Each structure stands twice: as structure tokens, then as C-alpha cells.
Amino acid sequence: MTRGRLILIEGLDRTGKTTQTNLLLEKLGPNAQLIKFPERTTPIGKLIDKYLTERSFELADQAVHLLFAANRWELSHQIEALLRSGKHVILDRYVYSGVAYSSAKGVRGMDLQWCIQPEKGLIKPDLTLFFTTDTAAERQGFGDERYEVEEFQKKVKVKFNDVFKMFENPDYRVNHIKILDVGNKTVEDVAAAVWSLVSDHIATN
Ligand code: DGP
Ligand code: NA
Ligand code: NA
């Protein structure tokens, strides 16, 4: 049995990750499974959901960061088992969101090196598609959750660049990162670009 591929779609809020991961799941069919982070239904995920949706729910930024990382560890055995069974696993966000959003807060001591520690050892994606755009805010408008504020999203965008630079370091290397500018593209155009990259990757690696 060939091992399945771990395919990650990363990016800022409102860049169409959820739409595109769902479309990719349809294309890959029953031989694939989609896992979205944060996974809000687990015990840890419920706390994360409360933090994101209730502004009055206070938690130290360090604790929030560790909860998001713990949420990925909660599902890590399931992801590895699926890959071993030959299924492809599509991820909607992962470690890179974790480091970019937390470090963008600018809290003293929560630099990239601090943020990456609890993520170390999680299985690495085989292919990462990073959605970027200059026009996300105009495109769809932000929602009401804690981080969906234009000023903060700008900081996250800068951090994502730093994060991907850091992940060129051999200790943390991310394989096969493709940057997709989704600004002003239709859902169909983005879906076609995603499918071309994913199907090529599966055919040739
Ligand atoms: P989503 O359900 O994909 O819209 O994600 C919810 C919000 O949480 C979104 O603003 C991005 C942010 N986020 C996702 N993963 C992490 C993480 O690991 N750490 C932090 N601090 N924020 C994250
Ligand atoms: Na969001
Ligand atoms: Na955080």
C-alpha cells in the first residue's frame, strides 16, 4: 500500500481556503480526508472556539498558542494512521498559521523561535499551497472573530513571509511550498491551479 500524501492549504483569513479544500476533497474522492485546524469539536478545540468567538473570554497569549498546537497534536495519530492506510489528507491550516498568528501579536518573548517549539515533531506536509492576496478584505469582508481585523491581518501577512523563510532552514524544512496569488481570481481559476499542482505532485512524487 502506498502511503497517502499530506497536502496543506495555508493562508490569511478570507482567502478561500475552506472553499478550495472542500473542492479538492471532491476531486480526490473517497481516497482522501479533510482536516481543518483549528478542529473546534475536540475538548481543546472547544476552548479555542470560545476564545475566538467571545471577546470577553480572556486567556494568556502563551496559553492560546499552546492550545492551538495541542489541537494539532490531538489529531496527529489520526492523520498518521490515515496516511499509512493510503489515504490522502488535506489540511486547512496547520503549523504555519500557528506561528504566524501568534508571533504577529507582538507579545514580548513570543518570537518565531518560541512559537515553533510546541509544533516540533508534528508530521510535515508533502505539499504546501500558500494562498496570498492584497485584496482579501475588499473581496469578502472580515467576520466577527477575534483575529478578523484588517490591522492584525496585515501583521500576520508579514509574519507568514518570515515563517516560510525560517522553514527554509534544514531543521524545519517544509517541502514543496507553492505560493498562489488568489487576489482577483475566480473560485474556478483557483481550483484549477490547485488541482494542477496537487495532481502533478501525486503523479510525480
Ligand atoms: P479559521 O477557523 O481557519 O478561520 O481559523 C480561526 C482563526 O484562528 C483565524 O483567524 C486564524 C487563527 N488561527 C488558526 N490557527 C492558529 C494557530 O495555530 N494559532 C493562532 N494564534 N491562531 C490561529
Ligand atoms: Na477565520
Ligand atoms: Na496565540
Image (cartoon, rainbow, N blue to C red):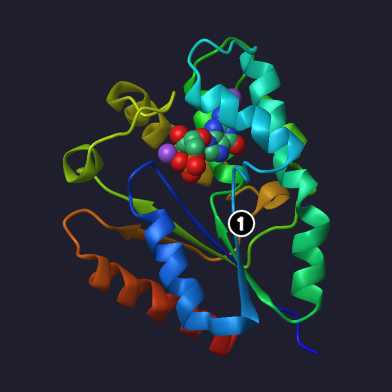
Residue 173 on image: x %, y % = 65, 54
Q: Nearer the viewer, residue 48 or 109?
A: 48
Q: Quadrant of residue 197?
A: bottom left
Answer yes or no: is residue 116 visible: no
- Figure check: 103 above or below 195: above
- Please state the horizontal and vertical placement of residue 163, each as a whole percent of the image: 53, 40
Splitting the image into four quadrants, where does ligand 3 fall?
top right
Compared to residue 72, the image places residue 180 above or below, namely below
Badge 1 is on which residue? 174
SS assignment at label 1: loop
Q: Nearer the viewer, residue 32 or 56?
A: 56
Residue 66 in view here: yes
Q: Is residue 74 above or below residue 195?
A: above
For image coordinates 30% across by 22% down, the residue present is 151
Rendered position, 195 above or below 108: below
Image quadrant holding the C terminus, namely bottom right
Position of residue 15 in the picture relative to residue 94 (left or right): left
Tell me the residue at 70%/30% (across/down): 67
Q: How many marks do you count on the picture?
A: 1
Three-letter residue code for mark 1: Val
User: At 38% from the left edge and 41% from the top edge, which residue is drawn?
Assistant: 13
Q: Position of residue 55 (x, y in %)?
A: 48, 15
Residue 103 placement (x, y as % from top left): 54, 25
Q: Quadrant of the N terminus?
A: bottom right
Badge 1: residue crowd in 10 Å (few <14, some 14–19, many ≥20)? some
In depth, the one of 37 and 113 nearer the eye is 37
Q: Is mark 1 within 8 Å of ligand 1?
A: no
Answer with left or right where residue 117 lies relative to residue 130: right
